[in-house]
Amino acid sequence: MGFFLETLFGGLMAGMLYSLVALGFVLIFKASGVFNFAQGAMVLFAALAMARFAEWIPAWTGIESRLVANVAAFVLAGAIMFVVAWLVEFLVLRHLVNQEGATLLMATLGITYFMEGLGQTIFGSDIYKIDIGMPKDPIFAFDTVFEGGVLINQEDLIAAGIAAVLVVLLSLFFQKTATGRALRAVADDHQAAQSIGIPLNRIWVIVWCVAGVVALVAGMIWGSKLGVQFSLATVALRALPVIILGGLTSVPGAIIGGLIIGVGEKLSEVYLGPYVGGGIEIWFAYVLALVFLLFRPQGLFGEKIIDRV
Amino acid sequence: MFYRENGQFKTSYAADQQILPIAQDRWAILALVAFAFIGVPLLVDEYLLRAILIPFLILSLAAVGVNILVGYCGQISLGSGAFMAVGAYAAYNTFVRIEGMPLIVALLSGGFFATLVGMFFGIPSLRVKGLYLAVATLAAQFFCDWAFLRIGWFTNNNPSGSVSVSALPVFGLPVDTPLQKYLFCLAVLVVFALLAKNLVRSAIGREWMAIRDMDVAAAVIGIRPMYAKLSAFAVSSFIVGVAGALWGFVHLGSWEPAAFSVDRSFQLLFMVIIGGMGSIMGSFFGAAFIVILPIVLNQLLPAIGHLFGIEISTAAISHAEFMAFGALIVWFLIVEPHGLAKLWSIGKQKLRLWPFPH
């Protein structure tokens, strides 16, 4: 029982991290209909920027405090993501309005290659550490309930907390601010939004900025867990089953989908993996999502797909 | 002046339904094929054959297969690399396990098993479409990556996980030197391209296009979506599987599952989109572009650095290659979203009026 719960918690925590990456996908898809494959590259880029600035700022300014260095690095990396968002809109999306989904998908793949190359050219291609002072020691929970208790990683708990705060902030932003309302209007109907005077281009920049910040937070958490390296860009592939499970257009879907995929992956790896040779995590997530899709083609929370001739 | 069809009257249905109704096109294609079979072997050296021409031929074949699914039937697939892998490993297993198996039959059996797997993973297309389907086909990719890595039977229980083949005779003729390999691939490609071209202008090809343009409307006029979609998956994965078998047997010789990773799937989709969706000709353009671009960049970037007196490290060059590749793809999609095939047809239209445009 303890072991099962431990696996379950591990899965939920991993799922929370997948949700963070998936959120970026969903935000951009909702607002602009672009399936943004570059989200993984954005996570890598943001994490690289954050890691290197946290190293460089003390060297440049002589500030010793780690907190100040980290906050400054976070702000600088965020600013860089804003610039990236603006450039993507200005150089790419603006010219590809009204193209087919597949063409836009390929364009974001091009952006992926570009950002992977650029990030490593500017910031270097070694493995870097992000040290934001997360406690690494595991804690025991429920040891009063049953024998031995459950081992929980504190770092995971804090990461899940940050993710939850981010989700709350995002939903407040979407529901309560004027910009958020404009974003939802654009997501609902481009033409209608434009005809009542919402500037599409500015909305796209904003939504890419928000996705950039989400990528930065995701990169920060993943980076402090696993180190910042090239393989971080492949988390995009881990997040894809999450969004098709949750629905391409649904923010809660990204969260719930992430949790389901995270738990499914861990449980399958632990209980099913030994029988078939292990390493089944990645395809199991996809197959799980696929089975869901066969029953609900629009994902768990996606908008119902209506076909009109 | 030269490219006018004036005076070419079609007096029979057969003449009207030729693949290339304009005589100049016919002669140009025949001349091109003849040049590929006779002229190229006389002109090029081994490096060019091995590094550019053989990969180009095999990947064009794969791109033709992907184009049938993505360009003609409108089902975006990111699992093409997996179908190539299935083709390669199935061909390997039939070749190794059955004594005296001819190479051609082994390649075709690779195609056959790829067809089965392709149809199986095509089943979701009956329920989901568009980008959902694209992600769903990634399931095929990751499952096959895993299966060929972890299940020892597929690799003949080879401890290193890589498989290799050697001594490939075709009808008693050896396929060993790059030149022989080139001619063999070219022959296979010509046959399959002709088949594909005829298939897409037949009844089934028109069904695929109807499904692509609007599947509900197609179903209303009596096209069975299940039959059309699954047949597109079947034909596409057969061709892709044969290409995969060729890639393993002829180009690589010995390979691991990493040769058919998700990057390969993206690469094939790039070829189709850059070449032109829904155009057999476009598949060749796209394959040429994607095969040659990295090689050109690899040569060009150090040369540019040298020009400015900067020595660029290998790591920096590979990063710069990534950047240039990505930027070119984006630029290309912006300039011509309909692909190189569209440019080609615009060029032909212009040529018809040349030198006296309206």
Image (tube, coloured by chain):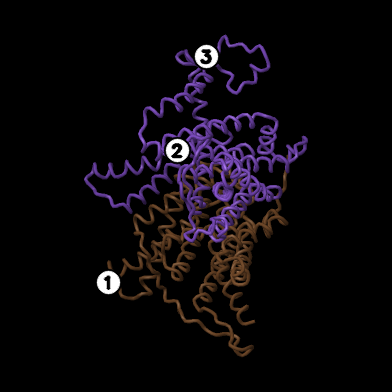
Chain colours: A brown, B purple
Query: Callout 1: few (<14), some (14-19), or many (20+) C-alpha neighbours within 10 Å?
Result: few
Q: Is residue A308 visible?
A: no
Residue B4: which numbered mark, if any?
3
Q: Secondary structure at mark 2?
A: helix
Q: Is residue A269 left or right of residue A54?
A: right
x, y (%) of residue B350? 49, 21
Residue B54: which numbered mark, if any?
2
Q: Which image quarter: residue B110?
A: top right
**Tag 2: residue type?**
Ile
Q: Which image quarter: residue A277?
A: bottom right
In the picture of the structure, the residue carrying the numbered disc 1 is: A62
**Tag 1: residue type?**
Gly
Q: Nearer the viewer, residue A5 or A212?
A: A5
Q: Is residue B152 positioned above or below A34 on the image?
A: below
Count the numbered circles shown. Answer: 3
Q: CA distance from mark 3 to mark 1?
A: 75 Å
Q: Residue at x 56, y 61 (%)?
A: A282
Q: Nearer the viewer, residue A10 or A161?
A: A10
Q: CA distance from mark 3 to mark 2?
A: 35 Å
Q: Secondary structure at mark 3?
A: loop
Query: Callout 3: few (<14), some (14-19), or many (20+) C-alpha neighbours within 10 Å?
Result: some
